[in-house]
Image: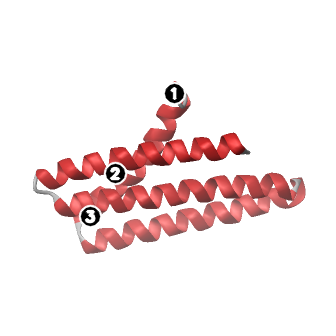
Amino acid sequence: MRDTKNLERTIMKRAAVLAVLAAALLAAAGLPRMALGGLAGTAFGLASFHLLGAAVAAAVAAGPVRASSQVMLKYLARYALTALVLYGTLRLDIGLFLGTAAGMVVVRFIVLLTGIFGSL
């Protein structure tokens, strides 16, 4: 369990560093709303990643009878919330939407790279 928490912290730190660097570059390029969206999207992606880990841990502790229903409900809740966030940002501004979507992808990208190259 301790290794899981350390890996989660590593992924969060890497995603935060990448998001801040990308936001600084976007802001310097004259795209402040996209930079803000990227930071917000990364924060939301990290929260979703944490909720996914908590759902898996709860399912393992719950046993096989309740595990599938718990995981399914939390899965649907996370994706419904993601849809609401993306819809809300799209209604506000296309730059904010693109930044938010890119920020969410940053977290998946960091998870993928950490899985391939390890936590170094």
Residue carrying label 2: 102
Distance between the Cα atoms at labels 2 and 1? 25 Å
* Spatial CA span between label 3 and label 2: 10 Å
Left or right of 13 on screen, residue 29: left
Mark nearer the N terminus (3 vs 2): 3
How was the colour assigned to the protein in this rendering?
secondary structure
The answer to whether residue 64 is above or below residue 114 is below
Q: Amino acid at mark 2?
A: Ala
The residue sitting at 52% across, 42% down in the picture is 10
Q: Position of residue 17 (x, y in %)?
A: 36, 46
Amino acid type shown at disc 3? Leu
Name the secondary structure under disc 3: helix
For residue 41, side relative to residue 62 (left or right):
left
Split into 4 quadrants, where in the image is the N terminus?
top right
Determine which residue is flagged by label 1. 120
Mark 3 = which residue?
Answer: 96
Residue 11 vertical placement versus 48 (above, below) = above
> Residue 49, image x and y in percent?
55, 53
Q: At 51% across and 69% down in the image, what residue appears?
A: 81
Residue 74 is situated, as x and y percent measured from the top left of the image, at: 66, 64
Q: Nearer the viewer, residue 86 or 53?
A: 53
Q: CA distance from mark 1 to mark 3?
A: 33 Å
Mark 2, mark 1: which one is toward the viewer? 1
